[in-house]
């Protein structure tokens, strides 16, 4: 071993490769080599105190480590471990498609079989990023076709995917097995047709929440009759009818199918036929649960779910009615995840359902269940770890129904294991959030959305500063925080001071001055993503993060008070950052930067930026 190994150059680091302290990977490798010291600083390993492993042994050990953070720590120990990690890695995660180029990835990791890539900023979900902004998958595929001809898995989120790209993927990678598209756009069902036709070994096709041009369900008939390998099939977000005959034949052939999520056009009658072929399912997304679509007695369908003894996840249930909800009761005892975000249930209907669901860990709901429904959650779900409550009518300000602070407090009392919450409501109080933090101190994700911007504590009329102060003071494991309501700089002072493990912060319509953002950037030592919209933060706030941004993944600021000159100053001071300004329509003030996206990169400025994206 080189007696004085050097740390690999940072140019080889992909965005997924984070520098972290020694952890499970170090423990594993030290247990194999007892003479190797566990050092907090892993730049140098003394050859006199270590035993050199054969490359085959070291690569075998590294293949057992799944965490990309742990693998990154291992790669920084010495040259031998760096090279062993390089050759043994099979999966790479890229959190920002512009943080690195596909050429760099291919040179760094020559044996990749699985790739996960994220594209557009998260605020694209709120239509704040133009459709043709970028994040095209094709340049990646063209490089992968040469570097990774045996690529098996591709998982994309917020990427631009064309039908041509899907056809290229289907025809150029002979052993391709798994495709997952989440919140992507630019393709149609013709692209799915190419995947179904050419991918002879497909095990997974997962299509979720995409901006897809739905040209009909003909694509589902294109799977070859010899295909029997499918394990995951999800087309719940598509609208068109598919050939049920083709779907039934496909399901009956694939004896290893574990996940099946159909769209709302599949009736209960048809679902019953499908489940007769795949009682081994672990995750099921149903179609419509309406009376008009049922021909047989309810008891027949109860028996249908009784045979699904491995089912742990249930979703769909579109248009569910009280008459047919009992159909799923036989499967409820084993469920750990129940997604009711498409079922407009009332409180009594939810209470009856949850009385059969004693093992739930995750629950997604619409706010039509009201506070009474959330009381049932607190009473029936003692093991609950994740709760998401979505608004049924998010844009109708005249609707005052839904959930309030009362329902949230009820859940926190009965669900002390709660770790993750996304909660949409129209009113909240400081006292309620303080009680919630006290009842559930182990939150890692806390996302509270008070839907009326600038809403104060509706009882005291005070800002909501103390609410989020309670969260960050009490919940020391917090990693993700989304804040809302009437908030002053005091909230951000609390966040900067107490959020030692915070990685992602989302802010909208909050703050009093530049000090708010400065507090966050001067604190929060683990901050990786900062998302800000419609806040009074300006140039001083932006430039206060000069020493922070290179350790973060990205910063988004829109509708703030940032000037082009401040953005230029940031770009000049930190050339390893890409500072992009997304210009609005013609006639806008050219001196102001209305949308700013800052991210670290080892690939330099983008080569595909459209005219409205200015890279400084």
Image: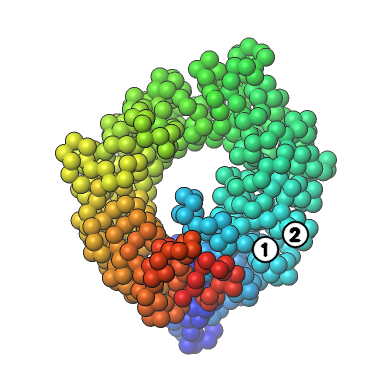
Q: Label 2: which residue?
A: 168
Residue in front for this viewpoint, 447 or 66: 447
* Residue shown at 37% from the left, 49% from the top: 445
Give residue 10's position: percent from left, percent from top: 49, 78
Placement of the N terminus among the 4 image quadrants: bottom right
Lateral position of residue 111 relative to residue 449, left or right? right
> Which percent across, then down, holds residue 170?
75, 55
Element on which disc 2 rests: helix
Query: Is residue 433 visible in this depiction of the protein?
Result: yes
Please provide percent x and percent y for residue 34. Answer: 46, 71
Alpha-carbon neighbours of circle 2 within 10 Å: few (<14), some, or many (≥20)? Answer: some
Helix, strand or loop under label 1: helix
Q: Nearer the viewer, residue 35 or 474?
A: 474
Q: Is residue 327 above or below residue 600?
A: above
Q: Which residue is mark 1?
A: 138
Residue located farthest toward the right when viewing the structure as drawn: 225
Q: Is residue 419 above or below residue 523?
A: above
């Amino acid at each position: 071993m080189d007696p004085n190994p050097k740390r690999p150059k940072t140019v080889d680091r992909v965005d997924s490769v984070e520098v972290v302290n020694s952890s499970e990977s170090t423990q594993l490798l030290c247990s194999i080599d007892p003479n190797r010291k566990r050092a907090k600083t892993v730049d140098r390993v003394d050859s006199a105190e270590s035993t050199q492993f054969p490359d085959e042994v070291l690569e075998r050990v590294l293949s057992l480590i799944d965490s990309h953070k742990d693998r990154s720590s291992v790669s920084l120990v010495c040259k031998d471990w760096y090279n062993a990690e390089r050759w043994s890695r099979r999966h790479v995660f890229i959190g920002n498609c512009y943080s690195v180029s596909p050429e760099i990835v291919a040179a760094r990791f020559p044996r990749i079989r699985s790739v996960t890539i994220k594209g557009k900023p998260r605020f694209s979900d709120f239509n704040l990023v133009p459709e043709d902004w970028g994040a095209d998958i094709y340049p990646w595929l063209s490089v992968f076709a040469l570097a990774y001809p045996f690529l098996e898995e591709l998982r994309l989120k917020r990427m631009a995917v064309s039908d041509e790209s899907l056809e290229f993927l289907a025809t150029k990678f002979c052993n391709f097995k798994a495709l997952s598209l989440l919140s992507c756009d630019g393709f149609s069902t013709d692209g799915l047709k190419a995947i179904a036709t050419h991918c002879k070994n497909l095990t997974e096709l997962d299509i979720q929440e995409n901006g897809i041009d739905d040209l009909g369900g003909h694509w589902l008939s294109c799977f070859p009759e010899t295909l029997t390998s499918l394990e995951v099939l999800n087309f719940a977000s598509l609208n068109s009818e598919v050939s049920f005959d083709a779907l039934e034949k496909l399901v009956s052939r694939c004896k290893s199918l574990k996940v099946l999520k159909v769209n709302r056009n599949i009736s209960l009658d048809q679902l019953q036929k499908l489940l007769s072929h795949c009682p081994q399912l672990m995750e099921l997304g149903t179609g419509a649960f309406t009376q008009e679509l049922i021909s047989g007695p309810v008891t027949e369908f109860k028996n249908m779910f009784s045979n699904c003894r491995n089912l742990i996840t249930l979703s769909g249930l579109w248009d569910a009615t009280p008459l047919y909800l009992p159909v799923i009761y036989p499967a409820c005892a084993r469920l750990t995840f129940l997604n009711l975000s498409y079922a407009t249930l009332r409180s009594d209907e939810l209470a009856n359902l949850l009385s059969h669901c004693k093992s739930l860990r995750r629950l997604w709901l619409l706010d039509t269940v009201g506070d009474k429904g959330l009381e049932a959650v607190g009473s029936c779900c003692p093991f609950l770890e994740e709760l998401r409550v979505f608004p049924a009518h998010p844009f109708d300000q005249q609707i005052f129904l839904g959930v309030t602070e009362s329902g949230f407090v009820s859940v926190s009392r009965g669900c002390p294991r709660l770790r993750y919450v996304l909660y949409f409501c129209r009113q909240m109080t400081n006292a309620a959030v303080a009680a919630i933090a006290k009842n559930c101190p182990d939150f890692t994700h806390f996302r509270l959305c008070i839907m009326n911007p600038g809403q104060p504590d509706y009882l005291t009329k005070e800002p909501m500063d103390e609410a989020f102060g309670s969260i960050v003071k009490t919940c020391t494991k917090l990693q993700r925080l989304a804040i809302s309501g009437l908030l002053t700089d005091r909230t951000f002072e609390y966040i900067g001071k107490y959020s030692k493990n915070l990685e992602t912060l989302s802010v909208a319509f909050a703050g009093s001055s530049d000090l708010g953002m400065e507090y966050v950037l001067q604190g929060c030592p683990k901050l990786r993503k900062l998302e800000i919209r419609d806040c009074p933060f300006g140039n001083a706030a932006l430039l206060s993060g000069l020493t922070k941004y290179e350790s973060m993944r990205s910063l988004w600021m829109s509708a703030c008070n940032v000037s082009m000159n401040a953005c230029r100053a940031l770009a000049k001071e930190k050339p390893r950052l890409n500072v992009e300004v997304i210009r609005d329509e013609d006639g806008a003030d050219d001196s102001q930067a209305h949308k700013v996206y800052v991210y670290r990169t080892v690939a330099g400025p983008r080569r595909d930026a459209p005219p409205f994206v200015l890279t400084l």
